[in-house]
């Protein structure tokens, strides 16, 4: 699971950035809103909503926020036509990038994403041009507070996990992508402290950048994508350099 470890180190750095939490709440709220309007506000009969609630909790979205979004979406008669769009392309130096969006105007979103690629030394490609380099997996990160590994193994496999890896400060558990939030709830119920849980895309190989301009532009490209309200997730295979302290 070394690839998972590298990926989650990157993800954890990203999540602690200023404003990252608010963006997570906003993006989760949009997903839940669309789900409620499509399948109703009752998680007992809307399995997708049930998974999204578990996902929101795994991302530390407060229960009050979740309930407020569901209530608002259930009482809102405006059936906004959000749809999922996925764009693929190459960043500076050939870094593979997948951008998942939830948008009510796909022409606007496609133009924005293409502009970011072009502006920062990359190019947007066709569907499938880089996705073959990624595998969708579920990854759960737990705090490691001196856990007994035999007990951990028993708990993980009883919960339905595929594998786990123990590091100094965290435990990383791999699952089928459709089961990640269910398994994270089971492990939380067994007393493990959840850091994160996500259905994510893990790259099979990583690309290292050494050119200073490419390094700068790759960072700017990711920042631009992250700042776009229509962008839900960005996956890439950039082997990001380790940094000491703040940027």
Image: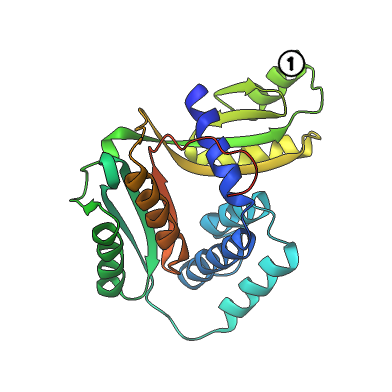
How many marks can you see? 1
Q: Which residue is mark 1?
A: 149
- Residue 110 coordinates in the image, percent (x, y): 26, 66
- Residue 134 coordinates in the image, percent (x, y): 35, 35
Residue drawn at 59 percent across, 55 percent down: 50
- Residue 176 coordinates in the image, percent (x, y): 49, 33
Residue drawn at 74 percent across, 13 percent down: 150
Residue 212 in which image quadrant: top left
For label 1, the SS is helix
Q: Which of 3 and 80 lies nearest the eye of the viewer?
A: 3
- Taking 17 as reference, is 221 left or right? left
- Residue 49 coordinates in the image, percent (x, y): 56, 59
Asked if residue 61 can be seen in this view, the reply is yes
Residue drawn at 31 percent across, 75 percent down: 105
Around disc 1, counting alpha carbons within 10 Å, would you say few (fewer than 14), some (14 to 19), or many (20 or more)? few
Is 106 situated above or below 234?
below
């Amino acid at each position: 699971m070394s690839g998972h470890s590298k990926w989650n180190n990157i993800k954890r750095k990203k999540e602690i950035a200023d404003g990252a939490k608010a963006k997570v709440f906003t993006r989760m709220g949009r997903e839940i809103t669309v789900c409620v309007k499509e399948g109703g506000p009752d998680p007992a009969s809307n399995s997708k909503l049930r998974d999204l609630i578990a996902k929101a909790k795994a991302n530390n979205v407060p229960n009050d926020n979740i309930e407020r979004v569901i209530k608002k979406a259930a009482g809102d008669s405006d059936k906004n036509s959000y749809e999922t769009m996925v764009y693929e392309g190459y960043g500076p130096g050939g870094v593979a990038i997948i951008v998942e969006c939830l948008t009510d105007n796909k022409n606007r979103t496609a133009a924005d994403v293409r502009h970011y690629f072009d502006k920062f030394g990359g190019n947007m490609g066709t569907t499938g041009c880089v996705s073959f380099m990624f595998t969708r997996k579920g990854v759960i990160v737990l705090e490691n507070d001196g856990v007994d590994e035999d007990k951990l193994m028993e708990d993980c496999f009883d919960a339905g996990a595929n594998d786990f890896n123990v590091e100094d400060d965290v435990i990383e558990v791999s699952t089928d992508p459709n089961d990640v939030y269910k398994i994270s709830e089971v492990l939380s119920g067994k007393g493990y402290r959840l850091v994160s849980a996500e259905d994510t895309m893990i790259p099979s190989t990583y690309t290292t950048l050494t050119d200073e301009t490419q390094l700068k532009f790759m960072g700017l490209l990711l920042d631009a994508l992250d700042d776009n309200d229509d962008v839900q997730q960005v996956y890439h295979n950039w082997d990001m350099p380790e940094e000491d302290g703040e940027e």
